[in-house]
């Protein structure tokens, strides 16, 4: 009977460790998703340098 109690204690200890690893994985994944969401969505009032028209030479007559 004593061996069985020791085995149960080892199994319980492993469950606690694995739960900690899973919890850390969920926290890291959640932080990553939040950062991607914050960086991917930008406010509408920001104007990019690439939004301006390209300077074209006058010889093309595209005006």
Image: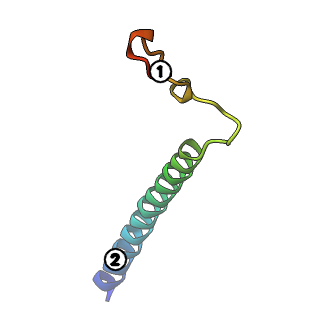
Q: How many marks?
A: 2
- Residue 16: give its label: none
Q: Between disc 2 and disc 1, whose residue precedes?
A: 2
Task: Please tell me which residue lies in front, 50 or 34.
Answer: 50
Observer-side mark, 2 or 1, equals 1
Residue tagged 2:
6
Q: Residue at x 67, y 42 (%)?
A: 43
Residue tagged 1:
54
Q: Residue furthest left?
A: 3
Task: Please tell me which residue lies in front, 45 or 58.
Answer: 58
Q: Position of residue 59 (x, y in %)?
A: 39, 10
Crowding at dot 1, Cα within 10 Å, few <14 / some 14-19 / many 20+, comes out as few
Horizontal arrangement in the rendering, residue 6 relative to residue 31 (left or right):
left
- Compared with residue 5, is residue 17 higher up or lower down, i.e. above or below? above
Task: Please tell me which residue lies in front, 8 or 16.
Answer: 16
In the rendered image, which quarter is residue 22 located in? Answer: bottom left
- Compared with residue 17, is residue 49 higher up or lower down, i.e. above or below? above
Q: Position of residue 33 (x, y in %)?
A: 50, 53
Q: Residue at x 66, y 33 (%)?
A: 46
- Compared with residue 44, is residue 19 higher up or lower down, i.e. above or below? below
């Amino acid at each position: 009977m004593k061996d069985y109690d020791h085995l149960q204690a080892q199994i319980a200890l492993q469950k606690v460790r694995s739960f900690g690893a899973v919890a850390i994985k969920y926290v890291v994944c959640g932080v990553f998703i939040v950062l991607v969401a914050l960086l991917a969505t930008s406010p509408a009032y920001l104007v990019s340098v690439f939004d301006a028209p390209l300077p074209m030479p006058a010889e093309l007559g595209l005006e």
